[in-house]
Image: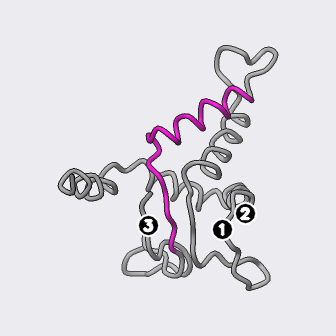
Amino acid sequence: GKWFRDIMGDRDPENPEVYPGLDIKVRRFTSRAAMKARQRIEKEHRTGESRSGPLPDAVIDRIIIEQVATAILLDWKGVIGADGEAIPFSVDAARDVVTKLPDFRNIVLAMSNDMDNFKTERRAAIEGN
């Protein structure tokens, strides 16, 4: 996975896409682990009439939330709860946060889908071999 620094908190007026105060570590959306998780989660949701064909939007949202929580969002630092206390990373905490904060979920998804975010890691791994 890759760490992204300072992505949430008070937005910087000079750069509205930068959120100071939170670091997250994400895995590529198209990684083998993320895709296997997606297949497993989707299979769990395909029951009865929805065994084939398109799934309802609400079910797709639940699948995405579960995929982000279990296979894409790997760690965080600086997530603060309503009580002002830091929330330690766990899959359950990630599930709760990405469910309650769709903007945060969308940021995680955007970062995990942007292949440019992972090119330097790949290049370094290739050069290191």
Q: How busy is the neighbourhood of tag 3: few (under 14 within 10 Å), some, or many (20 plus)?
A: some
N-terminal-most mark, 3 or 2: 3
Image-based side of 125 in relation to 105, left or right: left
Residue name at image x 71 percent, y 55 percent? 95
Res 3 label: 3
Q: Is residue 19 above or below residue 45?
A: below
Residue name at image x 73 percent, y 60 percent? 100
In the rendered structure, which segment of residues is drawn in magenta? Answer: 23-44
Q: Residue furthest left?
A: 127
> What is the secondary structure assignment of the residue under circle 2?
helix
**Quadrant of the image for the N terminus?**
bottom left
Give the residue pinned by disc 1.
89
Q: Amino acid at mark 2?
A: Ala
Q: Amino acid at mark 1?
A: Phe
Image-based side of 23 in relation to 124, left or right: right
Image-based side of 33 in relation to 55, left or right: left
Give the residue pinned by disc 2.
93
